Image (cartoon, helix red, strand yellow):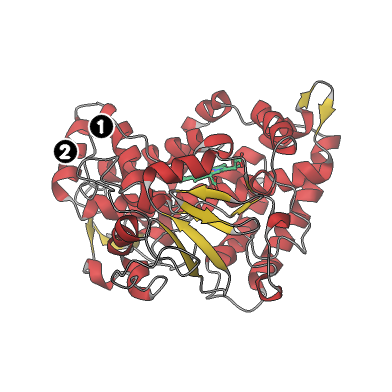
Amino acid sequence: MHDQPPSACPHGGPAAPRPSAPDLFTWEFASNPYPAYSWLREHAPVHRTELPSGVEAWLVTRYADARQALADQRLSKNPAHHDEPAHAKGKTGIPGERKAELMTHLLNIDPPDHTRLRRLVSKAFTPRRVAEFAPRVQELTDQLIDRFGEKGEADLIHEFAFPLPIYAICDLLGVPREDQDDFRDWAGMMIRHGGGPRGGVARSVKKMRNYLADLIHRKRADPGDDLISGLIRASDHGEHLTENEAAAMAFILLFAGFETTVNLIGNGTYALLTHPEQRAELQRSLGAGETALLETGVEELLRFDGPVELATWRFATEPLRIGGQDIAAGDPVLVVLAAADRDPARFPDPDLLDLSRVDNQHLGYGHGIHYCLGAPLARLEGQTALATLLRRLPDLQLAVEPEELRWRGGLIMRGLRTLPVTFTPPGR
Ligand code: HEM
């Protein structure tokens, strides 16, 4: 299927003539990037492009190349390896993180530091802790539906997909209930980046960071049964996280686990509403008390239109080749998970949503040593949210035409700005 050699990239590829690359990062592209990704996979699978920020980077779009790049330790996560021109400084991380001293987190470091920190956090953030959290996720989900259910209409992003993960992660971390609405506001500012006031994101990041540092201080004196206390307690061969490391860790759990889950619920619900046969099949199986289709279904929704469109930044530490393309030391590389997960060389009928797909090793949670640490929590929240929506609001439908919906258009994440729906209020 991929028989063409990687062809003419502006950065030193062979000069074989080919049609010009589609426009990337336009509003049209944000609504539906998949035709452009299909083109790139076919014609320029490792493609150098200028991003809207002005930074140049390589986009990797084929599944095999993407999987290999995600596991390639010559691609560093440490931005210090970026051979960055002055205009690119500070444009490859979380807005505000440099000033906020949040740099030492899992997505910015390499082994051996990464190995040590990941081992420590894995001791606190265990699949068992997540499984024990299931009743609380169900309770939060039901409370949110209770709040908007009577209206018979809602914006599922703002009233459901957005609050659920922020309250869930706050509860898990041990943020007291009375402070959680502050988190909701700060997180709201972060998710609106671009649309919010100037400097608002950096200010929100700073407030969160200060709050977490203070909370860690208090939990050290008075530990509880929460994840932050677990992070403080976690030790490995006598080693502990410093307070700074614990604060950066709590922040990255929030940051990595929040918008991603909002978009899993948003994109997933949207995909179900626009694929009525698949949705009906899922509703039938849930009605029969089965969970198998829900489990394979959420994985398929991640593959089909996942929340993380591009994996986070990687930088070549030495000259290397990906998919036959030479990459220079210092070059940024972005693995396009959304393109790899629609690669026909890996997935039969990749543009078809098939909730029962089983051979589905998608890259929606990444691959290799940075594989998503929160995948068990994301699965729990995604499965609970979608199953409860379909069970309690069985005639849920889009209130607008799909073409009227607006996508956020950020670089890394893919998600809807709003998702207006109508339904019969539960119990009527
Ligand atoms: C559907 C929801 C989610 C998706 C699609 C997702 C996706 C990803 C992806 C693709 C990566 C790898 C990025 C890369 O290699 O560049 C990643 C890493 C990570 N995720 Fe998630 N994530 C989700 C939810 C969560 C949640 C709920 C948490 C925690 C509360 C979380 C915490 C993390 C952390 C800490 C990392 C960094 C791991 C490391 O560098 O070792 N994620 N996630």
Dots 1, 2 in contact, CB < 8 A = yes
Q: Earlier in the sequence, mark 1 or mark 2?
A: 2
Amino acid type at mark 2: Glu
Q: Nearer the viewer, residue 22 or 178?
A: 22
In this image, 296 relative to 319: left or right?
Answer: left
Label annotation for residue 293: 1
> Residue 281 has which mark?
2
Horizontal and vertical percent position of residue 42: 29, 56
Question: What's the residue at 37%, 39% (across, down)?
Answer: 362
The answer to whether 275 is drawn above or below residue 377 in the figure is below
Task: Categorize mark 1 by other alpha carbons within 10 Å: few (<14), some (14-19), many (20+).
Answer: many
Image quarter for ligand 1: top right
The disc labelled 1 sits on which kind of residue?
Leu
| Residue drawn 31% across the image and 56% down it | 150
Ligand 1 neighbours mark 2 (CB distance < 8 Å): no
- Residue sitting nearer the eye, 382 or 403: 403
